Amino acid sequence: MSRVAIVGSCISRDLWRFRGESDTHAATELLYVSRTSLPSLFATPPTGFRPAAKPPGGLKAQPHRALVADLSKTALATLVAFRPTHLIFDFIDERFDLLSAGPALVTDSWELEASGYRRQPALRGARTIPRLSAACERLWLDAAAEMAALVRATPLAEAKLILHSARWAERRRTAAGRTAAMGHVEILPGRPGDIAAHNALLARYEKAFVELMPPLARVEAPDLRVSDDGHLWGPSPFHYVPAYYAAIWDQLAPLGVRPSLAAA
């Protein structure tokens, strides 16, 4: 049975939901690292951060674990210790701004805002590094090189590396089954997202990543990148129609990804 690690977003995690494997199953063979960014993974943790004993701000357990991992910088050690047979990268979560708090970097996700951790002394006064800025892109490219070095120097070198290539959808399927333009989108409430700019950024990220990393298999379904108004998680440029997940899963199977129980 394959042991799959995902460094990415719900577009990869939802492949297991597509197979009917939900959060209620035992978390044995899938590791999901999300709500982070490559620069944040390799950064110094904010000094004095203290996670709550229970998820604050109405967060569920998995999003809270992902948030705490991003703040505490534990994800990479967990990833290496997991010793995956397959390691999937997707960069859809690479849409959030970064926050700089002294030498520390963290991901300015919705979960961070909802948790109230932004108000802790560890992050008070943190400076925003906009995702579409040249500074953020430079940080990301440096971190991509660090990821390549980590993979080569650890048991991750034994994993089958897979790039799940994705973009923000420009079209959506309505509740009536019609196709329409995406229209206005937000990254966080009150923070609009530019679909074309972020898709161009994703293309640059992927090109650089492929050049830096050991050989990667690539899975993609460009013609099926259509947002689904009826998606489990609601309308979004990266909540796709069911046919998308089916097409990607069909590409993963020949790479040796086998059914496994999904992580919560």
Image (cartoon, grey):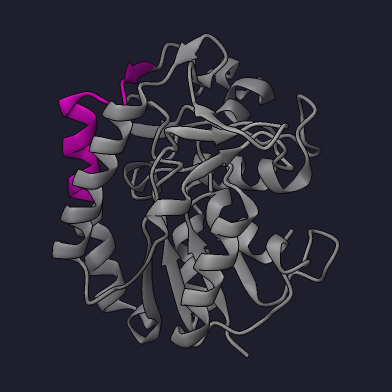
Relative to 228, 140 lies left or right: left
* Residue at image coords 53%, 76%: 250
Q: Is residue 135 magenta?
A: yes
Relative to 162, 35 lies left or right: right
Residue at the limit of the structure toward the bottom, as seen here: 1
Task: In the rendered view, tell whether residue 217 sits above or below residue 176.
Answer: below
Task: In the rendered view, tell whether residue 256 sits above or below residue 65.
Answer: below
| Quadrant, the C terminus | bottom right
Closer to us: 63 or 90: 90
Residue 40 horizontal/vertical position (percent): 38, 42
* Residue at image coords 36%, 75%: 161
Residue 64 horizontal/vertical position (percent): 68, 41
| Quadrant, the N terminus | bottom right
* Residue at image coords 51%, 43%: 226
**Quadrant of the rendered image containing residue 134:** top left
* Residue at image coords 53%, 20%: 188
The magenta region covers 127-143
Residue 252 horizontal/vertical position (percent): 49, 76
Residue 119 horizontal/vertical position (percent): 59, 15
Q: Is residue 256 magenta?
A: no
